[in-house]
Amino acid sequence: MEIVYERGSGLDIHKKTVVACLITPDAQGQRHKVLRTFRTLTADLLALHDWLAGAGCTHVAMESTGVYWRPIFNLFEGDFALLLVNAAHIKAVPGRKTDGRDAEWIADLLQHGLLTASFIPPAEQRELRELTRHRASLVEDRTRVVNRLQKVLEDTNIKLGDVATDILGKSARAMQDRPAGRANRSQSAGRVGAGTPAGQARGVGAGVSGRLQTAPSLPADGVAGPDRWPG
């Protein structure tokens, strides 16, 4: 079979180790394989990088195993032609060996041009994706907290959402930060309703009048577990 890439390497990536198979031509022009195992610490990955670069390796192929490929891809990017391959595609290629040396099988497929690389956007686009995904996650977390607060207030019949546009706004927080006593809540509501018609001010006072239940007990670390949350 025709050799497409004369010097290439296949990486079998795990959580704690990386098995690398480097294929290069020897003095007689025959294929020479070397298998080495590295840890996934940064110093070891840099040693893997230097070993491949020192042997004149031009192409490196790896499976898209979880997120374990990302540190290697980030360190090797720009120095080698990287191919991130779907594991299902590798398994679908006929002739797979049964000795379990996945790195050697990946290197063989790479050398003969039988691998199809997945699209990996440039580093700047990947960073922007991570930033936008993180922001979306924070917005979702805030929404869950607001919904949880709204549920707790409804359980105590405090209709804060009926008298305040935003239950986390300045006025609503001022009422929530007051102690639980009825008189204190009424005084706080009176201050919030200052400058509004009397009927609206009375509506604010009625909206924040409720009956608080006993707070759930907290464990020693001060954080309530899911089985102790109210509701």
Image (tube, rainbow, N blue to C red):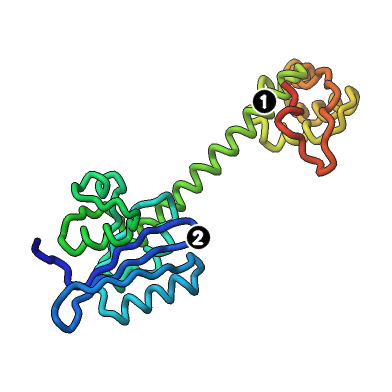
Residue 19: image quadrant is bottom left
In this view, the residue in front, 149 or 43, is: 43
Quarter-of-image position of residue 202: top right
Could you tell me if residue 58 is visible in this image? no
Looking at the rendered structure, the secondary structure element under dot 1 is: helix
Farthest residue, direction front: 99
Residue beneath the point at 30% across and 73% down = 79
In the picture provided, is 8 more to the left or to the right than 124?
Answer: left
Please give the label number shown on residue 16.
2
Q: Residue at x 36, y 78 (%)?
A: 51
Q: How many residues crowd mark 2 within 10 Å: few (<14), some (14–19), many (20+)? A: few
Q: Which residue is mark 1?
A: 150
* Residue type, numbered disc 2: Lys
Frontmost residue, 205 versus 208? 208
Q: Nearer the viewer, mark 1 or mark 2?
A: 2
**Is residue 203 visible from the viewing direction of this image?**
yes
Residue 130: image x %, image y %?
44, 52
First-in-chain label (1 vs 2): 2
* Relative height, residue 123 to residue 184 (above, below): below
Location of the C terminus (image quadrant): top right
Looking at the image, residue 4 sits to the left or right of residue 53; the answer is left
Left or right of residue 208, residue 34 in this image:
left
Identify the residue at the far left of this view.
Answer: 2
Q: Where is residue 203 shown, x and y percent of the image?
A: 74, 17
Image point 88% across, 22% down: which residue? 182
Choose top left, top right, bottom left or bottom right for residue 84.
bottom left
